[in-house]
Every structure is written in structure tokens, then in C-alpha cells.
Amino acid sequence: MADTNSGALVEAESLSVHFPRHRSATRPGIAAVDRIDLKIHRGEILGLVGESGCGKSTLARTLLGLIEPSGGVVRFGGDSIGNLPERQMRPYRRRMQIVFQDPYSSLNPRMRIGETIAEAMFIHGHATKSDAAPLVADLLKLVGLDPAMAGRFPHEFSGGQRQRIGIARALAVRPEFIACDEPVSALDVSIQAQIVNLLHDLREKMGLTFLFVSHDLAVVRHISDRVAIMYLGRIVEIAPKERVYDEPLHPYTQALLLAVPVPTRTSQKRSARKVMQGEVPSPLNPPSGCHFHPRCPHAFAPCALKQPPLREVATGHFVACHLYEPQQRSAEPDHAEDSARREGQTPHGGGSQVMSTNPGQMIERSGEYR
Amino acid sequence: MSTVDATTAIDKGPPNDRPGGLLLDVRDLRITFSTRQGDVNAVNGVSFDVRRGEIVAIVGESGCGKSATALSLLRLIPELPGRVTGQILFEGDDLYKMSTAEIQAIRGDRIAMIFQEPMTSLNPVHTIGRQVGEPLRVHRGASADDALARAAELLGGVNISEPEIRIRNYPHQFSGGMRQRVTIAMGMGCKPDLIIADEPTTALDVTIQAQVLELLCQQVDNNHSSMLIITHNLGVVAQYADRVFVMYAGRIVESAMAHELYSDPRHPYTMGLLSSVPRLDQRATERLAEIAGQPPDPLKLPPGCPFQPRCPRAIDRCRVEMPPLEAVSQTHKRACWVDAHG
């Protein structure tokens, strides 16, 4: 990357996480995270998007030191924290926190929520039993809850309120970095916006750095500064958000964006959609070369043979795809199909000879439904 | 009330067995569950209809009664603790007046159901072939061999490769998206007139969701079936439905043709929902529009309109009197006291 070390709060360098198959350690494990390089800059919200099983949650937890990396380095504020013993890890734990997906299972049902929020303060020496109460009240106010609710139990709250409690707990130790693992996926549509707005406000107020893990491209677009797309353990594209959404380069990113149904309708008739075929392959036995090539409409000879490196193709825009390797530059894919659907997108020129090598992957249903 | 309007309109329409004819007519459906805390009115007088060849969506958030509505149609709400009243007319016959044998003859044959969780709606100890072929054995008297052969064809029809081999597999050998395609194949076996799909893609990944929805609509169209799709996803509705019913706290608050609902929503709840969803087709603004507060506890529904405590436009009348579902155009109704254009 072009920028210097100073801007990055969290950093992964060739980071790998392998989970053993069965109990025998003899065979190579599943590469949930496969040699990932990533920097999260101070004060930014980095969105991490991918489908289930792509390794996005594993990556987030490894960055937090909750999973031990199998290879590579994790740095926090410039210090390597990958394999630190727990005692030395503790000061870093205070500086990084996590908000979980499921607000129903991530709060202890037998603790009052005030106790839950205060517990982390005691552990990290931010407060004592006697002076915790006003701090808890401030935190509850900060996340939009009534401080009088501190004495209640989790079951007395709705999903959205519980997620606010989870956020208050994360904030209790005044962290610099918060990883949110699908923080709104379990919530109702009308409540999601409340939590997204809350995270936005907290970033503004407290200058926090966020990693926002989600499968929902629309929510990620809303909240993130930069977006990384993961597929089978690797980052396939990372760029400032407007570039990812207006000018997605990786065929997988393009397919993901096309797959999201947009809540708008102008005509009376339903219209056919282009749909990517195939499923995410098993990470136990990922395809050779570029993991995406069996589903890729633009795949050509080198894709099955060689894994493309993540390469900077425009300022801050990195993509791992053979189509953008220097010798293949002339063969940019044709974006016309998605620009038709999204506003503010400039259709690319570029040869379509690559696309024609494998046109069968995208099926288009014939015409209108009726 | 609104049901009367609907029926008179339909009497002038085409006969029931042709496209556009009335297939399912639900009138004043109410579902109550007895709990220890008291009676919960999950559905409070809901009327809607599905015509032949149509895809109708019911949209709403969790707890609005949409799934209870779906289950009640095939009499799948357990009599205790549930209590269902109202009329559910399928081709003019009240499903709740039928004998057990009669309703069983309809389930899986004339009306099929696809559930949200493909993991729990397939039996883990039977082969896929046996399960997909079952409706044909039960309703069409097919032999085990014929049913199995037909199951393989059906699996091929939902793009499962090597179906002759896959019919011998068990559900755990399939991925989530494949399992949902299996349940679609199972539902389509008898070419039902009506498919009820309750959040059919919520448990699936985005790219797989798109595949499954496309496939489902394709199959519905090929078989000239109708579909009632229950979902919380406004994007799914926009893309696939012809008509939409928006539910809130056990009531229908707005109903319209899909394109009308998106271009001209008339209920404050629908408007709020549409503007609070982050969208891929629009530039991100700094803050999302929020709907303040939370959906009401069905045990303690507020007086008047159930949405009034969260409604930015609520007036005094909203707090005392429930607004009826009134027509704003021939195809568009809403239940709101406030003139949405005011």
C-alpha cells in the first residue's frame, strides 16, 4: 500500500488462519483466512463484505486476537500482537472491542445490564464498584437508552435495544477500535436504521475506528469509508466505497451488487434478472488458481492456473483479478449490464472478447415474465 | 368494508378458472394465541385475495402476523393455543369447513408451502428422492419407482446436477441453497395452483437468494400457478410481486399494485420503511431516516391505530380510533386518518 505505517491502527500482513480438519493435524486444514494483507486506518470505518463461509468473521476475530493466526502478522498501533500470551495481550484487549451479531445470545441473561456494562470497567480498572454507576448511566444515554434501565435484565429489552446495550458494553472500556460482526443482520428493517445511525454518530463523537463486517452491501455502503470484498478466505477487492459501488472491478463484486434486489419499481411488469449461477465452493477444497473462476463469467486461461495477487489498479483501488494484470489490460470486462440498473455509473468501453470465452455462466431469462 | 368492494369487483372479472380469476379469498382473518400473559391477537381482521397467475406479497417486520397468516391458510396453526376465525375461501370453498381428509387432499397437491428454513423442513433420515416423490405417491398414487423417477426430473428442473445420483442422497449432503431448491421441487411436484412461500430466501446468501427467487418465479410461471410470498424484504417484493399487502401489528395498513406502492406509498409506515432502508441504487446520505421507537407488544397494543406511537404524522383521532382500510384508487388502499398528500 502507498500509505505509511503511521495511518494504520490495525494491520494484517500475509495473515492466515487454518482450521484443522477433524482432529488429525497431519492433513492441511481449511484456510479460512488465506494470506491477507489489510490496513485499517485510524478513524475510518472499513466495511468487510462476503457470503457465509468466506472467512470474514474469522478475519475480524483474528484481528482482535480472539483467534490465533496460523501465519502472518497482526499489528495493533504498530505492535505485533498475533501470538502474545494472554497477560501481555490484556492492555491491547482494552483498546479493541467487539459487537456481536446476535443481541439475544451475547448478553448474560442472569446479569442486570448495568452489571454487564460495568464488568469490563472493573476488569480493566476503569472504575470501582462505588463509582461505576454514573459511568454506566452516561454510556446508556450515549447509546440512546434510559439510564433508569440499568437494573433490568436482557429479556426485558427488544432486539434493537439489546444491540444498543452490546454497543454500550463495547464502549465501556473506551476502546480505539471496534469490530462489529453483522451488528444489524438480526434486527428488523425499521430498527436497522437506528443502529446504523448510532454507529455513525459514535464515530463522529468519539473518533473511533470500526471494522464493519456484513453480508448486506447496502448497509455497508451506507456506513463505510472503504469496503473490502472477501471470497473464500481472500480479499478480492478493496477500495474507497464510491469506487466499489460505482465502478466495481472484480467480477465477484459485480455479481454481488447485481444480486441485491433494489426496493424500487417503475413498471407494472416484473422483469427478468441476470443471476450468477453456481454456489460458493467448499473451503475444504477450493478451486485452483483464482477461487472464483468456476463461477466467473469472464474466466479465461490463466484463472484456473494462477492465483491473482491483490494489485493496485487505481489510487487506493486494489483488485485481485487476472483481467487487470498489466498484460491483460486491454481485456477489461464490459460493465454495460450493471450500469443499466444503477444510476451514476459510467459504462466502460473495453473489449468484450474475454466475456465471450465463457458466456454460459450468466443465464438470462427470456424477456418479461408475462 | 373493504372485502365487499373486493368481491363485487371480482364478480365482474373473469371466471375463477382462468388467469385473473379469484383463487384464494381471505376474509376478516383473526388469529389469537392464548398465553399465560393473556390472549395475543397476532392477526386482527385481515382480508386479502390471490388471483390466478399472480404473485402476491405480504410484507412486514417480525411479529406483524405475516407468518401466522401464512400458516393459517393451510390450517397449520395448532388449535391449542391458537384460535382462527374468519373465512379462507379456496376456489370458493372454505378451508376451515372441510374435513381433515379434505384439507389433507389439498395440502401439497393444490396448495404447496415453502418454508424459510430448508434445514428444518426436510426430514434428515429420508433420502431426497423419497421426500421429493412423496406428494406424487400420496396425491397421485404413483408407485415408489415412478415417484423416484419423477423426483429426479423435478430435481433436474431446479438445476440440481446429476439428479439420478442425488435422489439417493440425504439432506445433510446438500448446501443451504440446494436444499431450498429441493423444497421448491417438492412443492412443484403436483403442479399446485397456489404456492405459499414464507420467507423462502431469508436464510440464504445474497447470490443464492437471487438464484432461488428467480427459479421460484420461473417455476410458478411455467406451471401457471399463483404465489403468495411472505417477506420482510422490500427489495424482493419490488422485484417479484404483482400486488403487495403491507402488514403492521396484525393488520393490513396498505395494499397496492407493486409499482404503485413504490412510486406512491400512502401509509406513513410504508413511507418510513421505504426511506429507512439503505439502498444500493442511491447515494448514501449521512444519516438514514429512522422510524422511531419499536413495533408494539402484541399483548399491549396501543389504542387507535397501532402505528400511532411511532407515526410522525399522528393526530388526535389516530390515538382513539382505528382507521379502516380505504381505497385511494381502484387498486390502492390504505388505513390512515391523515391525508398522506397533505
Image (cartoon, coloured by chain):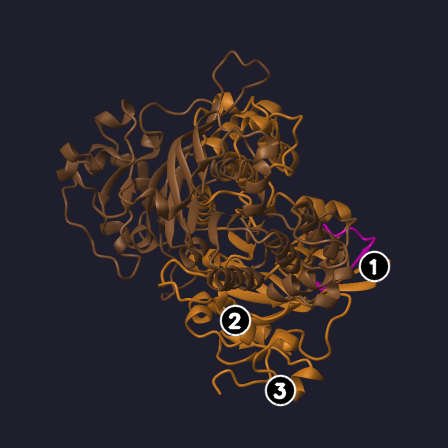
Chain colours: A brown, B orange
Residue at the spot 51% in from the left edge and 81% down from the top edge: B328
Residue type for callout 1 = Ser
How crowded pointer 3 is (Cα within 10 Å; few <14, some 14-19, many 20+) is rated as few
**Label 2 Cα crowd, 10 Å radius (few <14 / some 14-19 / many 20+):** some
Task: Evaluate whether residue A93 shows in this view.
Answer: yes
| Secondary structure of residue under mark 1 | strand
| Separation (CA) of disc 2 from disc 1 | 32 Å
What residue span does the magenta drawing correspond to?
B76-88
Q: What residue type is labelled 3?
A: Ile
Q: What residue type is labelled 2?
A: Gly
On the image, the x and y values in percent for residue B176 come to: 53, 36
Label drawn at residue A174:
none
Question: Residue A366's x, y, as percent?
Answer: 31, 48
Residue B22 in view here: no
**Residue, x 59% and y 27% (percent of image)?**
B172
Q: Is residue A250 left or right of residue B135?
A: left
In the drawing, what numbered circle is on residue B272?
2
Residue B67: image quadrant is bottom right
Q: In what element is the residue under mark 2?
A: helix
Quarter assignment of residue B42: bottom right
- The disc placed on residue B34 is 1
Asked if marks 3 and 2 fall on the same chain, the answer is: yes
Look at the image and say whether residue B117 sits in the magenta stretch: no
Choose mark 2 or mark 1, whichever is in front: 2
Q: Which of A75 and A237 is in front in this view?
A: A75
Q: Mark 2 lies on which chain?
A: B
Task: Name the residue carrying label 3.
Answer: B315
Residue B284 spot, x, y in % from top left: 38, 63
Q: Residues within 10 Å of mark 1 (few under 14, many from 20)?
A: few
CB under 8 Å between callouts 2 and 1?
A: no
